[in-house]
Image: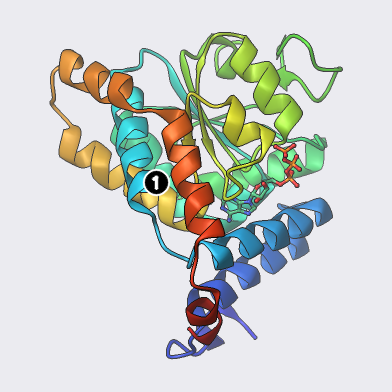
């Protein structure tokens, strides 16, 4: 079944399309096989969240947009799942906030780095970083910490969607403002972030872009206030409460 063959009136249309994109990503050498496992884990959390953007996630997405607009050198980190799921949306976000795109993989191979960079260019990216790999995030063994010196290495604000917990913690320890997109509010990545977005990346990335377009032209003080007012612990608590207090019967019948 191709993406266009997924019946639009299917009650689980969005979930089927998402799955299909990941499968295609694996077939094309963009997504790793471990990416399939990450997708399955994410789907389970999304199911429990009711497959919707919580108000607390929307607030996080607005704070993320403000942080990106107010940044000097913002970078959006792209892995194999992100490239497969939201290639157009991530390029649009980079344009909206004037951020660099950097391919950054847990399992770094030259082949996959190039496949993802090419895929992003096919979706409109003018420049894709990550292939130089001339810097390291301290505290990670070689290859797991490899980044570009003029990309993530020099960034003040970094978006890391679907990141491994270890790497997210090491990046947060560098003092950069870290924005994580992760459907599991209990993951170490979400807990390490200054701004954790507990939402599906397919909803989160376009919504950050919408907020960024609304906030474009705002004073730096207004943007900084939006970031300061954001409470990461409260956002994680709200997501956990939504999962634990959810109406499971309704979720399964949707
Ligand atoms: P941690 O160490 O932080 O607890 P992990 O290293 O075990 O996490 P992985 O198995 O690498 O995490 O999975 C990456 C994370 O991405 C998972 O927490 C999963 O819920 C999340 N995830 C998967 N797909 C999506 C998606 N489409 N949108 C948002 N988050 C997702």
The answer to whether residue 231 is visible is: yes
The x, y position of residue 158, in whole percent, is 50, 24
Q: Nearer the viewer, residue 67 or 27?
A: 67
Question: In this figure, what is the number of numbered marks?
Answer: 1
Q: Quadrant of residue 107?
A: top right
Q: Quadrant of residue 164?
A: top right
Q: 113 above or below 179? A: below
For mark 1, does the 10 Å Cα neighbourhood hold few (<14), some (14 to 19), or many (20 or more) residues? Answer: many
Residue ranking furthest to the front: 245
State left or right for residue 169 relative to residue 193.
Answer: right
Taking the spot 47% from the left edge, 56% from the top edge, the residue there is 242
Q: Quadrant of residue 118?
A: top right
State left or right for residue 44 relative to residue 231.
Answer: right
Taking the spot 36% from the left edge, 51% from the top edge, the residue there is 206
Taking the spot 43% from the left edge, 43% from the top edge, the residue there is 91
Locate the N terminus by quadrant: bottom right
Q: Is the residue marked 1 within 8 Å of ligand 1, measured from its CB?
A: no
State left or right for residue 244 relative to residue 34.
Answer: left
The answer to whether residue 124 is visible is: no
Label 1 SS: helix
Taking the spot 75% from the left edge, 27% from the top edge, the residue there is 166
The x, y position of residue 26, in whole percent, is 75, 60
The x, y position of residue 20, in whole percent, is 63, 72
Q: 23 above or below 142? A: below
Residue ranking furthest to the right: 141
Pointer 1: what residue? 57
């Amino acid at each position: 079944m191709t993406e266009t063959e997924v019946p639009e009136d299917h009650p689980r249309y969005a979930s089927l399309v998402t799955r299909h994109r990941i499968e295609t990503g694996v077939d094309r050498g963009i997504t790793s096989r471990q990416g399939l496992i990450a997708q399955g884990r994410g789907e389970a959390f999304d199911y429990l969240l009711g497959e919707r953007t919580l108000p607390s996630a929307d607030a996080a997405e607005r704070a993320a947009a403000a942080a990106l607009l107010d940044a000097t050198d913002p970078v959006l980190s792209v892995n194999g799942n992100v490239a497969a799921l939201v290639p157009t949306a991530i390029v649009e976000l980079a344009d909206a906030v004037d951020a660099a795109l950097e391919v950054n993989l847990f399992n770094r191979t030259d082949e996959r780095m190039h496949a993802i960079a090419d895929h992003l260019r096919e979706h409109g990216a003018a420049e894709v970083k990550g292939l130089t790999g001339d810097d390291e995030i301290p505290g990670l063994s070689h290859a797991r910490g490899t980044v570009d010196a003029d990309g993530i290495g020099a960034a003040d604000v970094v978006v890391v969607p679907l990141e491994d917990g270890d790497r997210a913690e090491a990046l947060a320890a560098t003092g950069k403002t870290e924005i994580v997109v992760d459907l599991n509010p209990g993951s170490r990545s979400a807990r390490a972030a200054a701004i954790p977005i507990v939402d599906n990346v397919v909803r989160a990335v376009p919504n950050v872009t919408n907020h960024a377009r609304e906030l474009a032209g705002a004073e730096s003080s207004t943007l900084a206030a939006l970031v300061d007012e954001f409470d990461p612990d409260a956002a994680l608590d709200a997501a956990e409460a939504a999962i634990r207090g959810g109406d499971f019967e309704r979720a399964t019948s949707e």
